[in-house]
C-alpha cells in the first residue's frame, strides 16, 4: 500500500510520535466495604489497566503508543508519580494525558503531615497540584486529564484554576473529564473509568466518528442514567454528574459504531459493534419510555 493509499488518521486523535500518557490507579481499603454490604468500590487498579490497554488498541485507532504509555498501579509513591509525569511532560509535543483513579477516602491515604493527593488547590502539599504544574510547563499543545476519585471536584480545580502561577506556559488546550466515586448501599453501581473504557470499546450509537471528551462524557452519562433505570430502588438518586472542561479538542478513539457512508472506507473499519452506548441521556429516557 502506498503512502497515498494509507488510511487517514483523524486529526482529533493524538499525534503518535509526540503524545504521552501517564495513568495512575490506586486502591485504598475502605472500612465500609468490609462489612458484607454489597461489593464496595470497583478496583481503580484494574480499571486503569483496562483503560491503558484500550488506549493503545488498534481497534479504536491506537490513540497512544504502548511505549509512550506509563501505568503506575503498584502503589507507587507520590514522588514516583511526579517523576513519571515529568518524563512525559519533557517529551510530549502534541497530547499529554494524565489519568488518576483512586478508591477509598483520600484523607486517610497519607500519614499526617505528608503530601495529600487531592488537597485544596491553595495547599502546597497536593500531589495533583504538582502534576498540574508539570503539565502546564510541558511543550504539549493538548492536555487531557481524567479523574475518578472521591474528591474529583477538588482535584479538578488544580487543573482548571484560571490563574496559573506566573512563569507557566499559556495556550495549551485543556480537556478534563471525570466523576466522583460514591457508594450507595455499600456498592458502587456507576464507576467512571471502566464505563469510559467500555464506551471506547463498544462505540457510541449515533455519535461522531472520533470520540472526543464531550461525546464520551455524554455517552458515559447516558450509561449512568441507564444503570439507574435498572436499579429497582426508589431511594437511589439520579445519575451522578460528570465533570467536564473543554473536551472538543482531542479524541481518545475512533467510534466503532460510526457508520461510514463510503463503502470502501467502511471495509477498513471494524464492523458495527454490538452493545454500543447511547449518545446522550435523553436517548435513554426515550428508550425506557420516560
Image: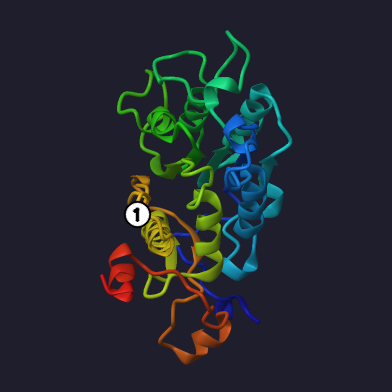
Foreground: 168 or 109?
A: 109
x and y percentages locating residue 25 in the rendered image: 63, 39
Which residue is depicted at the point 48% across and 29% down?
A: 132
Look at the picture and state if 56 lies above or below 175. Answer: below
Task: Give the left or right position of residue 89, taking residue 11 as reference.
Answer: right
Whether residue 254 is visible, yes or no, is yes
Foreground: 265 or 131?
A: 131
Task: Report the quarter where the C terminus lies.
Answer: bottom left
x and y percentages locating residue 126 in the rendered image: 51, 20
Residue pointed to by mark 1? 234
Identify the coloring: rainbow
How many other residues sit within 10 Å of disc 1, few (<14), some (14-19) or many (≥20)?
Answer: few
Q: How many marks?
A: 1
Which residue is depicted at the point 39% across and 15% down?
A: 122
Q: Quadrant of residue 226?
A: bottom left
Whether residue 26 is visible, yes or no, is no
Look at the picture and state if 13 lies above or below 186. Answer: below
Task: Report the quarter where the N terminus lies.
Answer: bottom right
* Residue most extreme to the left: 290
Look at the picture and state if 186 lies above or below 11. Answer: above
* Residue most extreme to the right: 74
- Secondary structure type for disc 1: loop
Which residue is depicted at the point 38% across and 63% down?
A: 229
* Residue most extreme to the top: 113
Look at the picture and state if 251 lies above or below 290. Answer: above
x and y percentages locating residue 39 in the rendered image: 61, 47
x and y percentages locating residue 124 in the rendered image: 48, 13
Foreground: 5 or 199?
A: 199
Task: Give the left or right position of residue 262, taking residue 82 as reference.
Answer: left
Amino acid at each position: 500500500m502506498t503512502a497515498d493509499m494509507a488510511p487517514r488518521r483523524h486529526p482529533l486523535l493524538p499525534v503518535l510520535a509526540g503524545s504521552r500518557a501517564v495513568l495512575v490507579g490506586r486502591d485504598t481499603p475502605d472500612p465500609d466495604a468490609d462489612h458484607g454490604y454489597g461489593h464496595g468500590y470497583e478496583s481503580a487498579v484494574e480499571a486503569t489497566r483496562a483503560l491503558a490497554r484500550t488506549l493503545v488498541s488498534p481497534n479504536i485507532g491506537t490513540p497512544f503508543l504502548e511505549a509512550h504509555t506509563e501505568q503506575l498501579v503498584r502503589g507507587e509513591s507520590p514522588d514516583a508519580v511526579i517523576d513519571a509525569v515529568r518524563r512525559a511532560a519533557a517529551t510530549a509535543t502534541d497530547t499529554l494525558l494524565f489519568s488518576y483513579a483512586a478508591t477509598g477516602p483520600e484523607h486517610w491515604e497519607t500519614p499526617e503531615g505528608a503530601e495529600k493527593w487531592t488537597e485544596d488547590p491553595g495547599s502546597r502539599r497536593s500531589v495533583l497540584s504538582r502534576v498540574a504544574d508539570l503539565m502546564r510547563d510541558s511543550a504539549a499543545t493538548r492536555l487531557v486529564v481524567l479523574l475518578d476519585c472521591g474528591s474529583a471536584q477538588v482535584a479538578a480545580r488544580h487543573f482548571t484554576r484560571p490563574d496559573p502561577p506566573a512563569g507557566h506556559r499559556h495556550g495549551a488546550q485543556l480537556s478534563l473529564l471525570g466523576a466522583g466515586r460514591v457508594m450507595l448501599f455499600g456498592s458502587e453501581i456507576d464507576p467512571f473509568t471502566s464505563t469510559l473504557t467500555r464506551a471506547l470499546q463498544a462505540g457510541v450509537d449515533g455519535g461522531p466518528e472520533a470520540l472526543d471528551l464531550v461525546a464520551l462524557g455524554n455517552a458515559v452519562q447516558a450509561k449512568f442514567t441507564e444503570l439507574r433505570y435498572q436499579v429497582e430502588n426508589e431511594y437511589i438518586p439520579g445519575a451522578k454528574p460528570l465533570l467536564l472542561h473543554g473536551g472538543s479538542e482531542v479524541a481518545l478513539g475512533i467510534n466503532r459504531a460510526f457508520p461510514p457512508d463510503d463503502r470502501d472506507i467502511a471495509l477498513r473499519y471494524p464492523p458495527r459493534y454490538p452493545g454500543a452506548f447511547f449518545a446522550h441521556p435523553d436517548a435513554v429516557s426515550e428508550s425506557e419510555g420516560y
